[in-house]
Image (cartoon, helix red, strand yellow):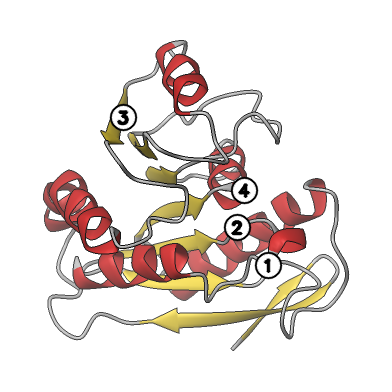
Amino acid sequence: MAVSGPAGPLEALLEEPVEGARAGIAVVCHPHPLHGGTMQNKVAHTLARTLCSLGLAALRFNFRGVGASAGSYGGGTGEFEDALAVLDQAAQLRAGSALWIAGFSFGGCVAMRASLERPVQRVIAVAPAIEHCEVSGSPRCPWLLVQGLQDELVDSRAVRAWAGDRREAVQLVELPGVDHYFHGRLNELRGVLEEALGAAARALPVR
């Protein structure tokens, strides 16, 4: 499917729960476009599939200039605008449903920033690259932050300090021995997501 974006159509993929569908939809943002990030990234894929298994529809998309998405890299601001457009589309697709947003690395920062501009009810950020992108605020809804302690690209200590400075409640899960791309540890990530988000997903109305 395609979503209408500020720079042209955005390539997107909507995944539906096989069973146990809930009144919720989650938008998933991928890693940095200039470093090979696409919606097929294995961590973004794990996020979408896990959320789908919890009963939410999952809407992954390619930022502008990636895959079949129109346009070219927008310096972060353009990608933020893309995320807002996809959130708007998700809200139309599932009117009256809970709107969640998730992201990995660069996408985690975009997700947190976008949550400040739309009525998002939950944020999931995996290894957010907070030292390389602007996140001036913090989500006003419940949010989960998952960080590997052997991350070679994102300083886990900086993430811990950044999360600690936020007044809003954040659930920080740190995973020993896990690198940035969760090599060999995707099942562990899935387990963390299921444990941290399962109750919130089950609390959503049955669709």
The amino acid marked with disc number 2 is Pro
**Circle 4/circle 3 CB separation < 8 Å:** no
Which quarter of the rendered picture does the N terminus lie within? Answer: bottom right
Alpha carbon distance from label 4 to label 2: 5 Å
47 or 114, which lies in front?
Answer: 47
Q: Is residue 40 left or right of residue 2?
A: left
Decide: is 47 above or below 121.
below
Dot 3: what SS? strand
How dense is the environment of label 4, judged by Cα within 10 Å: few (below 14), some, or many (20 and up)?
A: many
* Position above or below: 146 against 16: above
Kindly identify which residue carries mark 2: 31
* Numbered disc 1: secondary structure: loop
Q: Which residue is mark 1?
A: 36
- Indicate which label's residue lies in the foreground, 3 or 1: 1
Helix, strand or loop at label 4? It is helix
> Dots 4 and 2: beta carbons under 8 Å?
yes
Quadrant into which the C terminus falls? bottom left
**Quarter residue 164 falls in:** top left
**Residue plotted at (51% across, 70% down):** 41
The residue under label 3 is 172
Residues packed near mark 2 inside 10 Å, few (<14), some (14 to 19) or many (20 plus): many
- Would you say the residues marked 1 and 2 are in contact, meaning their CB atoms lie under 8 Å apart? yes
Q: Amino acid at mark 3?
A: Leu
- Gap between marks 1 and 2 measured at Cα: 8 Å
The numbered mark, 1 or 4, whose residue comes first in the sequence reads 1
N-terminal of the pair, mark 3 or mark 2, is 2
Under mark 1, the amino acid is: Gly
For marks 1 and 2, give the one nearer the viewer: 1
